[in-house]
Image: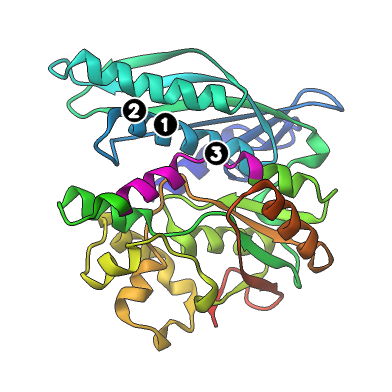
Amino acid sequence: MLGDVVGSLANIFGAADFPQLLAGIAQPDDAAVYQLDEERAVIATADFFPPVVDDAFDFGAVAAANALSDIYAMGGDPLFALNLLCWPGDQPGELLAEILRGGAEKVREAGAVLAGGHSVADQEPKFGLVVIGLAHPKKIWTKGGAQPGDELVLTKPLGSGTITTALKEGAASAAHVAACVAVMAQLNRKAMLAGRSLAGALHAATDITGFGLIGHAHEMAAQSSTSFNLRWAALPWLDGAQEYARAHIFPGGTTRNIDFYSQWLDGGDGIAPWQQQLLFDPQTSGGLLMAVAPAALAGLLHELEASGQFHAHIGSVSAAGAGRIRLI
């Protein structure tokens, strides 16, 4: 419903009146893109959420990496960021300082600068960033460029939603949480640079976040007028994710994702119900899902390997059934 409401605003800002807006409400993507001139386009995004982990510094770092990811998913470089903060007045200032430090260190790691922000009083802490980036207008990645025959590569393992929920329920091991935090806090910069090295052979990309693998894969496939074939056996999982899923530990967003996105999934009958649910597990600061020309697959995998970036070749793109996701 929210998507329909926001989409209705596109009528106020007609494409013919704003040709410089390369990605916006009328053609939603991971970030907005506004062309400045023949060589430069500004990329803008905003993202914030409540704590997903207990450690304040880690929460700040994860939230910042998640917001920065939208710039990388468009093939751009972050320039600067602004803090977005909701904070209860009765919470210790030391916690707030650690959250902000975690975010600032991650912005610095990305080669960007923290330039300010905005805060409001709220009953629940929330933190994230506005991020402004830059890219060449002819080299922007979108969700809608996948082509039949393309290969699909994912650059982080899945399962952060069920692990962080297990943490909240007191059921997660410290080792599983630490590994999950490390993945969530990892920037998608290396993955972006590997894709950028392909000189146009990377046709589409998005980052896997709150809609889970199936939700974001559907968005890519639908906007590309293609279908995606995903190999269950090739899907990578964080340590502990399948263990907690077997115990039916899932965040509430899993059910919402299933209710909305399961209509586009084919072939899930051959796996257990908990495995089906994992496909819809909401991710925090997940990896990039990339559609790459088959001739360039080996080059992409080589670049990812050389940079030390995790990667998995998880499927391919087909022509029939726009927006369908087939589990094979």
Which amino acid does the dot numbered 3 rest on? Leu
The secondary structure making up most of the magenta span is helix
Q: Mark 3 or mark 2: name the one nearer the start of the chain.
A: 2
Q: Reply yes or no: does residue 44 show up in magenta.
A: no
What's the residue type where badge 1 is placed?
Answer: Ala
**Res 10 seen here:** no
Camera sees residue 269: yes
Q: Report the residue at 26% width, 61% height from top.
A: 250
Helix, strand or loop for disc 1: helix
Tell me which segment is drawn in magenta: 176-190
Classify the position of the C terminus by image quarter.
Answer: bottom right
Location of mark 2 (residue): 57
Q: Position of residue 14 (x, y in %)?
A: 66, 36
**Residue under pointer 3:** 187
The amino acid type found where label 2 is placed reads Phe
Q: Determine contact: label 1, label 2, CB under 8 Å.
A: yes
Please give the name of the residue rendered at 38% of the width and 44% of the height, measured from the top-left corner: 181
Compute the Cα span from label 3 to label 2: 16 Å
Q: Position of residue 11 (x, y in %)?
A: 58, 38
The number of callouts visible is: 3
Above or below: residue 189 compared with residue 89: below
